[in-house]
Image: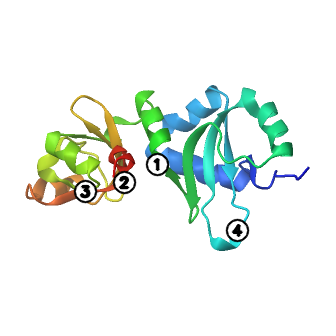
Amino acid sequence: MPNFEEIFRKLNKNEKKIVKDSLYHISNKIWKYILEEKYEIYIKISELRQNKNTPELFLIPQQLESEINKIKKLAAIKFSGIPFGFIKNKRLFLSLEAAELFFNLHKIDPRNILILNENGEKSVLYGNTIKKAMILNISSEIRTNKIVFLINKNQEFLGLGLLKVNYEKFRKLKNKDNVALNLVDKGAYLR
């Protein structure tokens, strides 16, 4: 039987550092949760590395590790656990599924949350940018190029955004000005 360990395996030391450092920029609670709840992050690397596929990451409970190892000896694993994101340019890009999981577990720093009105919710679900008039609540500690969790007024997770302004600039913006780019959202499943 073929050995697929190079295709689906645990993160190595360097990859783990990239993930850990990236997660700390989102919230210092996420990495701690992964360790406390005994999860492992696995990486799936395409067999055709020359086509520049980005390695996919999966969050898997440690108790499934022996099963994963058995399956790997028999067949290539395409998917397992919770999609966690991918690594590109030595940076973690968190998946929609992982972002929603950590939001629902209250592992996200409130400073990294944008609460949107109904127009903001629609804009996000259509894949559009977020304008100042669409924001109900924003932290005074926001920073440019920070990843934010986009939620509606009912505290439902909608997606992830990238802030384009800091708080000083935000206060001076007109209502029609862009505040954040939509990176990934739940509406993508419907478009």
Residue type, numbered disc 3:
Asn
Point 67% across, 54% down: residue: 15
Q: Give the percent coordinates (x, y) of residue 187.
A: 33, 46
Point 60% across, 54% down: residue: 18
Query: In this orientation, does residue 170 appear?
Result: yes
Residue behind mark 4: 49
Residue behind mark 2: 146
Residue type, numbered disc 4:
Arg
Residue behind mark 3: 128
Give the class, few, some or many, for how many residues have Cα within 10 Å of label 1's Cα (few <14, many ≥20): few
Q: Earlier in the sequence, mark 4 or mark 1?
A: 1
- The span from disc 2 to disc 3 (Cα, nearest Å) is 18 Å
Residue 153 position (above or below residue 55): above
In this view of the protein, which residue sits in the foreground, 180 or 189? Answer: 189
Secondary structure at badge 2 equals loop
Residue type, numbered disc 2:
Lys
CB atoms at circles 1 and 2 under 8 Å apart?
yes
Residue type, numbered disc 1:
His
Secondary structure at badge 1 equals helix
CB atoms at circles 3 and 4 under 8 Å apart?
no
- The span from disc 3 to disc 1 (Cα, nearest Å) is 24 Å
Give the class, few, some or many, for how many residues have Cα within 10 Å of label 4's Cα (few <14, many ≥20): few
